[in-house]
Structures are given as structure tokens and as C-alpha cells.
């Protein structure tokens, strides 16, 4: 996906900026009939797909957007709407001359403006309290525990597709610390699990692409909490080329990234304290915000984060990884599912290497939403509410997909394709059920 770092020709960028997407596609088609540099050609070929994905990310027209604000924000007024629009506080784009809003624009408004939190009509979750209770127990000296978890993941195709074969890749736990074991209990199709060395673990299946086609797998895994006592002064640096390198288009050492990193470090020499300074800056300056599908961003997600001072768990993890690598600290990506006794959802986090202790976990988004000792916990420690499915960023599948994935960088919601093309998120539903979560 490094071709995304290639700038769009100015006439295409101009048309897209004002929402003339059909004209953009027409210009792209004309450009592709010319002799072009390889990366520019790839960029333009993907741009048609990217436009379609962008439009799907903004499905809410202005009338429905106003209705959503009135329903979800207590005593919301037309005057407030005008004020928010005039000050660029609502996430919308123009599509062929009409305003369309991002599907989670109300939630992002609440994330960005604390004054709306008390007026936001939502069901308060007990999950945050559950997590905080457990990490408080660990901070106060309780021994780390090990758990046995049973999960069921399924994807369901919404409509018939004009194709012969439907291929499916579902996430599966990687057996590496803190995951102790993983075993399939039931699967409704013949399946293939990727190799032991795969850094993006999947269960691969095939079927006929008809509406209602469903792939379901039930499995058990064990996981333990990660708690370490560190003596920062004995931490030493180490060289690990793979975990110090750029991975375009998102882990890129731009002039802004480097300058900001050096400013944050303030001549710090100790690798542990370097990583801590980076963690502190991210958790105190980058607000949590839902993102569009990562595949729709044509600039570095890290650049987005440090320019807009917002981002979701993956963007915050990528920012930590990139800054650590700029600082000479080996760092890496890890992701999968945030699974707890109540619920499950996609989640991303990071690790950095601290010799002689090895890899230490870091979760900037969980830390950033907490204060005091709870925030400190997520630098070097981690709860057991993680199912690892990906131990690196932008890793290929086994077997590989023929077409660009719905998420080219990660796999948490599953991926589908036919022999004719990728099947995007709007064409299937993903469901994750936590069947049991028991101490063992």
C-alpha cells in the first residue's frame, strides 16, 4: 500500500475535495489510458475503489443527521447545529453537491467536546468499571491471573453475489505470550488455519456467495495478565532492524514526526524513559476519536493523529510505534479483539523492547481514557482482555487475498472476497459472542 504516499494529480484532488466524485473517476479513467510511473498507476487504479469506500463511510444525509443530533443530544437546537457547522465541528463531506455525514459523527462530537458528554443519550456501559476494578486490584498487589475464554465468531453475507466462490478469512488467536493455547471447538465449514509462524492468524473457509451464507467458528483460548516490575535505570538500548524500520504508508519518518519526537524526548537517553515520554505525550494530547476505514486514508495515519490531535486505538498505537522507532526504540504492533466477560470489540495496542526485560506492552488509548495510576498501568502492563490475532502491521494472509482487503493493514472483523473482487464491510455482518470467560 506504499503507493498511497503518491500524491493525486491536482485536477483529481480538486474534484474530490468539492465532492465531484463521478467527475474524479472520469478523469482517473482518462489518466490510466496514458503511460504512467508504476506507483502512480497503482495509486490511480486504487483511487476508484477508495472513492467508493469513502462514500460508504458517509451514508447520513443532512436531514437524518439533524434528526440524530436531536435524538441523541438532549435539548439540541437548530442554532447549535449552525454553530457547529460554521466552526467545522461535524464530520461531513460533499457528495455531488449535497452534505453527507460520517456514520459515527455524533459520537465523535461527544469525544471532542466534553460539554456534550452529560447531554449524550447513551446506555452507560459497565465494561469500563469492570476493567478499572481489575487493574486496580493488580496495582494494589493482587497476583496476575490466567483465564480460559470461549468465543464464537461469525460473518454473514447480506446479498447474492454474481460469482462462483466466496472465500472467508476469520481472525484466530496467535499462541504467543500472553496467549497460552488456542483450540477450535466447532466450525461449520472445512477450514484451514494459517501456519504457526503467521503474524496474522486466520481460519480460512469457502462457500457459495448467496445471501445468508454464514461462516461460524467457536474456539477456546487461554490468556494471562501481564504485570512487570521494572527498574528503569538498568534498561539498555538494542538494535532490531525489523522493529526500527518504516512501513509505508503509515509508519513513516516524516520531518514533522521526527521534529515532534525529538521535542518530546528533550535529550533523554534512557530507552525506557524515552518510551514513557512518548506515551505520556500521546495519552495527554491525542483525544480518542472513531476513524473512517483505514483503507480510505491517503495520508499517513500518524500524520493525521499529530496534526488533528485525535485518533482511535490503532492510530494512537501507530503513533507510539512510529515515534519509538524514530527514537531508536524497537517497537511493534499487536491487535485483535478486546474480549471481556461482557462484550467483545476490535482493538489495537503496541509493544516496545526494553533490554533486559524484553517486550513490554503499551496501550495508549486505554491509558489516555484514564487518570493517575490507572493511566500509568497501561505503560508496561496489560489486562487479560486481549485476543491476539495480529502480531505485526500489514501482514499478508495464508492463503493470500487476490484483491485489496477491506482492511489492508489488520484483520479483526474478517475478510471476504470472490474470484471477481473484494467484498466490502457493507456487504456482510460480523458477530462476536463471548460464551464464557473463566479464571483457570
Image (cartoon, helix red, strand yellow):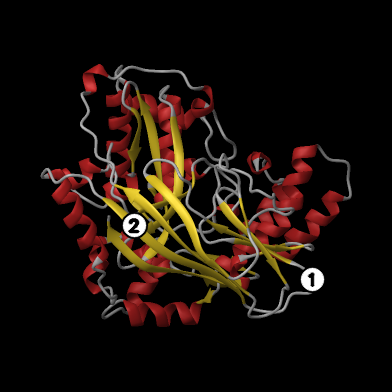
Please name whichever residue, 205 or 180, is drawn nearer the observer in this view of the structure: 180
Say which residue appears at 75% left-offset and 49% top-offset.
44
Please name whichever residue, 17 or 142, is drawn nearer the observer in this view of the structure: 142
Quadrant holding the C terminus: bottom left
**What distance separates the C-alpha of mark 1 from that of mark 2?**
40 Å
Q: Is residue 320 above or below residue 369?
A: above
Q: Which image quadrant is residue 83 in?
A: bottom left
At which x and y percent is residue 182? 45, 52
At which x and y percent is residue 17? 61, 57
Residue 425 visible in this rendered orientation of the protein = yes
Q: Which mark is residue 115?
A: none
Residue 308 visible in this rendered orientation of the protein = no
Which residue sits furthest left?
A: 140
Q: Which image quadrant is residue 5 in?
A: top right
Q: Which image quadrant is residue 424 in?
A: bottom right
Residue identified by numbered label 2? 148
At which x and y percent is residue 179? 40, 46
Residue identified by numbered label 1? 163
Say which residue appears at 43% left-offset and 64% top-offset.
151
Please name whichever residue, 34 or 89, is drawn nearer the observer in this view of the structure: 34
Say which residue appears at 55% left-offset and 42% top-offset.
199
Amino acid at each position: 500500500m506504499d503507493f498511497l504516499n503518491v500524491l493525486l494529480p491536482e485536477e483529481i484532488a480538486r474534484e474530490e475535495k468539492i465532492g465531484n466524485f463521478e467527475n474524479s473517476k472520469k478523469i482517473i479513467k482518462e489518466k490510466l489510458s496514458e503511460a504512467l510511473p508504476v506507483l502512480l498507476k497503482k495509486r490511480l487504479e486504487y483511487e476508484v475503489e477508495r472513492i467508493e469506500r469513502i462514500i460508504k463511510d458517509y451514508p447520513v444525509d443532512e436531514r437524518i443527521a439533524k434528526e440524530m443530533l436531536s435524538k441523541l443530544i438532549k435539548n439540541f437546537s437548530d442554532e447549535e447545529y449552525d454553530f457547529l457547522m460554521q466552526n467545522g465541528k461535524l464530520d461531513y463531506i460533499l457528495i455531488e453537491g449535497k452534505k453527507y455525514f460520517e456514520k459515527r459523527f455524533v459520537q465523535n462530537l461527544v469525544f471532542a467536546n466534553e460539554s456534550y458528554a452529560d447531554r449524550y443519550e447513551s446506555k452507560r456501559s459497565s465494561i469500563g468499571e469492570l476493567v478499572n476494578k481489575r487493574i486496580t486490584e493488580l496495582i494494589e498487589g493482587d497476583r496476575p491471573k490466567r483465564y480460559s475464554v470461549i468465543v464464537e465468531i461469525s460473518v454473514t453475507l447480506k446479498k447474492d453475489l454474481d460469482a462462483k466462490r466466496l472465500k472467508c478469512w476469520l481472525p484466530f488467536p496467535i499462541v504467543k505470550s500472553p496467549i497460552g493455547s488456542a483450540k477450535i471447538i466447532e466450525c461449520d465449514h472445512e477450514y484451514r488455519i494459517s501456519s504457526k509462524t503467521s503474524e496474522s492468524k486466520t481460519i480460512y473457509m469457502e462457500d457459495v456467495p448467496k445471501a445468508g451464507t454464514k461462516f461460524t467458528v467457536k474456539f477456546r483460548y487461554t490468556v494471562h495478565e501481564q504485570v512487570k516490575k521494572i527498574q528503569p535505570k538498568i534498561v539498555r538500548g538494542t538494535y532490531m532492524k525489523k522493529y526500527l524500520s518504516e512501513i509505508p504508508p503509515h509508519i513513516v519518518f516524516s520531518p514533522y514526526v521526527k521534529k515532534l519526537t525529538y521535542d518530546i524526548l528533550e535529550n533523554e537517553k534512557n530507552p525506557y524513559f524515552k518510551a514513557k515520554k512518548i506515551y505520556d505525550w500521546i495519552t495527554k494530547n491525542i483525544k480518542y476519536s472513531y476513524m473512517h476505514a483505514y483503507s480510505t486514508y491517503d495520508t499517513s495515519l500518524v500524520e493525521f493523529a499529530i496534526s488533528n490531535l485525535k485518533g482511535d486505538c490503532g492510530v494512537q498505537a501507530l503513533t507510539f510505534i512510529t515515534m519509538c522507532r524514530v527514537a531508536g526504540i524497537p517497537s511493534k504492533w499487536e491487535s485483535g479483539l478486546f474480549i471481556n466477560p461482557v462484550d467483545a470489540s476490535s482493538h489495537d495496542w503496541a509493544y516496545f523492547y526494553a533490554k533486559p526485560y524484553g517486550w513490554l506492552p503499551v496501550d495508549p488509548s486505554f491509558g489516555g481514557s484514564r487518570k493517575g495510576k490507572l493511566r500509568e498501568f497501561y505503560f508496561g502492563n496489560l489486562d487479560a482482555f486481549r485476543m491476539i490475532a495480529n502480531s505485526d502491521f500489514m501482514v499478508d494472509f495464508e492463503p493470500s487475498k487476490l484483491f485489496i482487503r477491506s482492511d489492508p493493514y489488520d484483520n479483526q472483523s474478517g475478510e471476504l472476497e470472490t474470484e471477481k473482487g473484494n467484498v466490502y464491510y457493507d456487504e456482510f455482518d460480523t458477530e462476536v459472542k463471548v460464551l464464557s470467560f473463566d479464571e483457570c
